[in-house]
Image: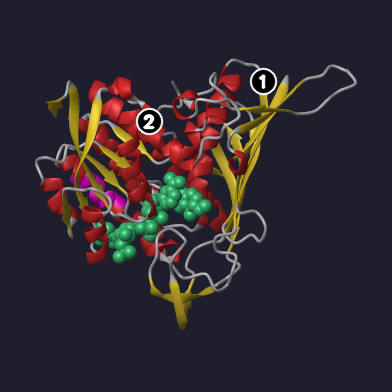
Amino acid sequence: MTEQDGRKSLGVGVVSLGWMGRLHTRSYKAVRERFPELGVTPRLVAAADPVDEIRDAALHELGFERAYADYHELLADPEVEVVSICAPNFLHEEIALAAIEAGKPFWIEKPMGTSAAQSRRVAQAAEAAGLATAVGFNYRHTPAIEYLRELVRDGALGRITNVRVWLIADYNSSPHSPLTWRASREKAGAGVISDLMSHGADLAQYVVGRIASVSAMTDTFITQRPIPTKVGFGHSGFEIGEETGPVENEDYVAMLVRFEGGAVGTMESSRVSVGPRAEYVIEVYGTSGSARWNFERLNELEICPVADGGAIHGYTRAMAGPQWGQWQRFQPAIGTSMGFDDMKCVEAAQFLRSVLNGEQLAPSAADAWCAAEVDEAAVASAADGQWHDVPRVQGRTTFDA
Ligand SMILES: NC(=O)C1=CN([C@@H]2O[C@H](COP(=O)(O)OP(=O)(O)OC[C@H]3O[C@@H](n4cnc5c(N)ncnc54)[C@H](OP(=O)(O)O)[C@@H]3O)[C@@H](O)[C@H]2O)C=CC1
Ligand SMILES: O=C1CO[C@H](CO)[C@@H](O)[C@@H]1O
C-alpha cells in the first residue's frame, strides 16, 4: 500500500472480466467518490482472463495497467494487493486457495465453489490465514434490506413465525436461450440452487437467522439447449447454432425450511419462469407485523403493523431514504432510486474497509459456506426425499453479530 495525495493507494487484481468482473471493476472505481472517508484509492493494477479481446478491453476500456491470460500471473504480481474472483463457479476454490497462499485478501462471487466442501475449504483457509474476505451477496446491501433486518432484530415485528423467500427469474425461460456454464454440473455445481438460491439462503439467514433443516424437491423443465457459437456476458450477447446439449442441473427448486430461532418458511427458485424477470422476494411475518421486499422494486419496503381491529389494515409502502443503510451516499434527493450496481459499490467499500482495519464487514467466506450448506442440504433432500439438517458452520460469520 502506498500513499498518494494523503490517500492510500491499494493495488487491485480482477480475475475474469465477464458480467461480474466488470461490475467489480466499476465498483472499485466508484468507492473513492462514494466512500471518501476510507481514504483509499483502488488502483486497477491487473486483470486476468483467457480471452484475447477481453484482455484488450481490460487495458483500453476498463483502465487496467496490465492484463494476464493466466490468473497465477496476476496473483504473483507484487503490486496486486487485493483480488476479485469473478470466474465461473468451478474455478472459485482453486483461485481462492491460490489467493490465500499468496496472502491476498479476496472478494469472491457467489456461490463460493461448486459444493459445500469447496466452500468449507476456502472459508477455513481464509480464516486460518487471517485474511479479510467478501462474497457477492449484494442484495444484503439494499437499504430496504438493511432496514428490514433492523426491524427483525429490534423486535418491531414481534416473534418471527414464518418466512417466504422466492427468486423467480426468466433468464432461461426460452428453450432457445443458450447452454452456458450455468447448466453444467462440473462448471456450476447445482443449477438454480447454486445460481439463485445461494442468494436466497444468504438473504434469509442475514435477515432472520440460521436455517437448521431443509426439505426440497427439484425439477428440470428444459432438458436440452442450443450450444453457443459465440459466448457472451452473464445472460446476454450469446449466439447459438443448430446443435444442442443437455442441461445437467435443476431449473427449479421448492424448499420447506426450519430456522434455528423457531420460525418456519418456504423458499422457491426458478430460472425458467415466464413472467417475472428477476422477482427476488423476502417476506417476513411476525406476531406484531410483517414486511416484504422485492428486488424488482428495490427501493421500497412494504411494512404492515398489527392494526388491532382498526378499520384500516394492510401494507404501507415505505421508500428508501437517508435513514436507511447507505442510501444517502448515492442519491442527494429523496424519491430518487438506487440501482443494482450501487449495492456492489457498498460491497466493495465494506471489503476495502475490512482490508484496511481488519474487521470483517462484508458477507464473509464463512457466510458463503453457511449458504452452501443450506443449498447442499436442499440438493440432498431433493435426491432422497428426506428432511436434512444443515451442518452448523463454525467460523467468522457476519449475520450472527
Ligand atoms: N452477485 C451477483 O448478483 C451475481 C453473481 N454472479 C456470479 O459471478 C460469477 C461469474 O458470473 P458472470 O460474470 O455472469 O459470468 P460470465 O459468463 O459473464 O463471465 C465469466 C468470465 O470468466 C472467464 N473465464 C472462463 N474460464 C476462465 C479461466 N480459466 N480463467 C479466468 N477466467 C475465465 C470467462 O471467459 P470465457 O468467455 O472465455 O468463458 C468470462 O470472461 C459466477 O460465480 C456467478 O455465479 C453472476 C451474476 C450476478
Ligand atoms: O447471482 C445472480 C443474480 O441474478 C442473475 C440473473 O438475474 C443470476 O444469473 C446470477 O448468477
Q: Quadrant of residue 337?
A: top right
Question: With respect to residue 177, does 309 lie above or below?
Answer: above
Residue position marked by numbered label 2 in the rendering: 362
Left or right: 96, with 180 as reference point: left
Which circle's residue, 2 or 1, is located before the other in the chain? 1
Residue at the spot x=28%, y=36% of the render?
124
Kind of element beneath mark 1: loop
Q: Residues within 10 Å of mark 2 (few under 14, many from 20)?
A: many
> Which residue occupies 58% across, 65% down?
220
* In the image, residue 94 lies in the stretch drawn in magenta: yes
The amino acid type, in three-letter code, at marker 2 is: Ala
Q: In this orientation, does residue 395 appear? A: no
Residue 339: image location, x then y, percent: 50, 39
Can residue 61 be seen here? The reply is yes
In the image, ligand 1 is in what quadrant?
bottom left
Badge 1, how many Cα within 10 Å: few under 14, some, many 20+?
some
Residue 383 left/right relative to 161: left
Q: Quadrant of residue 131?
A: top left
Residue at mark 2 to residue at mark 1: CA–CA distance: 27 Å
Residue numbers of the magenta segment: 92-98
Q: To which residue does mark 1 refer? A: 159
